[in-house]
Image: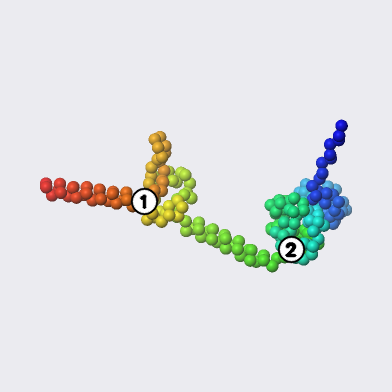
C-alpha cells in the first residue's frame, strides 16, 4: 500500500523556521536576564509577528535578490512577498497595522526590517496630499448634498418633513421632479418618493386646470 505524501509547509513558514531573527532573539535574551521570567501574551505575540514579518521579507529577498538591491516602495515589497510567499498585500498590511500597531504599513516595514530592505519614501508627501484632498472632497460632497436619500427611513416617513425644493435622491435638480408622500400599495406605509416631471402630463394638467378655472369664472359671471 502506497504511503501518503507528507504535507509541505508554506515557503514563509519554512523561512521563519530556518531564519535567525535578531530582534526576536535579543528581546528573548532580555526577558531571560530580567526579573520577569515569562513575557506577557501581547509581547510574545508581537515577537512572533516580527519574526513572521522578517521571515517573509527574508524569503522574498532570497528568491529575488536583484529586486532588493535598491530602494523599494511598499507596494513593490508587498508584490514580491505575494509572488514568492503567497502572502497578499492585505494580509501584510493587517500584520503591520493591526497586529504590530504601526501607524502605517511602510513605516512599520521600515521600523522592523530596515536591515533587510531599504524603503523609498520619495512619494510619501504626494500620497498624503492625495489622501487629504480625497477626504476634503468627500466632506464637501457631504456638505453640499441636499439629497434626503441620506436620511434615515424614519425621516422619510415623516409627513411633516419639508421636501419642497429639495434635490432628488441622485442629485437631480428640483426643476426635474418633485417629492411626493405616498405609499407603494394597499396596506403599506407612506413615505417620500421622488417623481420625475413628465412635460406632456404637466401640460395636460395645466390645460385642464386652466379650463376648470375658466368654467368657474363663467359660472360666477352668470350669477
Q: Residues within 10 Å of mark 2 (few under 14, many from 20)?
A: some
188 and 33: which one is in front?
Answer: 188
Tell me what residue is drawn at x 74 percent, y 51 percent.
87
Q: Which mark is residue 72?
A: 2
Q: Residues within 10 Å of mark 1 (few under 14, many from 20)?
A: few
Give whichever of discs 1 and 2 has the lower sequence position: 2
In the rendered picture of this protein, how many numbered marks are placed on residues?
2
Tell me what residue is drawn at x 77 percent, y 58 percent.
112
Question: Residue 181: x percent and y percent?
Answer: 38, 44
99 lies left or right of 2: left
How far separated are the C-alphas under marks 1 and 2? 57 Å
Q: Which mark is residue 169?
A: none
Return the residue at label 1.
Answer: 197
User: Is residue 15 visible from the viewing direction of this image?
Assistant: yes
Question: Residue 83: x percent and y percent?
Answer: 74, 54
Tell me what residue is drawn at x 72 percent, y 56 percent.
79
131 lies left or right of 27: left
The kind of secondary structure element at disc 2 is loop
Q: Are marks 1 and 2 in contact (CB under 8 Å)?
A: no
Question: Residue 212: x percent and y percent?
Answer: 22, 47
**Quadrant holding the N terminus:** top right
183 and 31: which one is in front?
Answer: 183
210 lies left or right of 14: left
Q: As displayed, is residue 122 above or below residue 164?
A: below
Residue 25 found in image quarter: bottom right
Question: Residue 51: x percent and y percent?
Answer: 80, 52
User: Is residue 25 visible from the viewing direction of this image?
Assistant: no
Tell me what residue is drawn at x 23 percent, y 51 percent.
210
Amino acid at each position: 500500500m502506497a504511503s501518503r505524501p507528507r504535507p509541505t509547509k508554506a515557503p514563509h513558514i519554512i523561512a521563519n523556521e530556518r531564519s535567525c531573527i535578531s530582534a526576536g532573539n535579543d528581546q528573548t535574551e532580555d526577558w531571560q536576564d530580567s526579573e520577569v521570567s515569562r513575557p506577557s501574551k501581547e509581547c510574545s505575540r508581537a515577537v512572533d509577528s516580527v519574526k513572521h514579518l522578517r521571515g517573509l521579507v527574508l524569503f522574498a529577498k532570497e528568491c529575488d535578490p536583484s529586486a532588493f538591491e535598491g530602494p523599494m516602495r511598499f507596494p513593490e515589497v508587498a508584490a514580491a512577498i505575494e509572488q514568492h510567499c503567497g502572502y497578499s498585500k492585505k494580509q501584510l498590511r493587517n500584520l503591520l497595522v493591526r497586529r504590530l500597531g504601526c501607524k502605517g504599513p511602510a513605516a512599520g516595514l521600515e521600523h522592523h526590517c530596515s536591515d533587510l530592505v531599504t524603503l523609498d519614501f520619495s512619494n510619501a508627501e504626494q500620497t498624503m496630499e492625495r489622501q487629504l484632498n480625497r477626504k476634503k472632497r468627500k466632506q464637501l460632497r457631504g456638505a453640499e448634498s441636499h439629497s434626503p436619500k441620506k436620511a434615515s427611513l424614519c425621516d422619510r416617513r415623516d409627513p411633516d418633513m419639508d421636501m419642497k425644493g429639495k434635490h432628488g435622491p441622485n442629485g437631480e435638480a428640483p426643476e426635474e421632479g418633485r417629492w411626493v408622500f405616498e405609499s407603494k400599495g394597499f396596506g403599506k406605509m407612506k413615505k417620500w418618493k421622488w417623481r420625475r416631471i413628465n412635460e406632456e402630463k404637466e401640460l395636460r394638467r395645466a390645460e385642464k386646470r386652466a379650463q376648470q378655472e375658466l368654467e368657474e369664472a363663467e359660472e360666477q359671471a352668470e350669477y
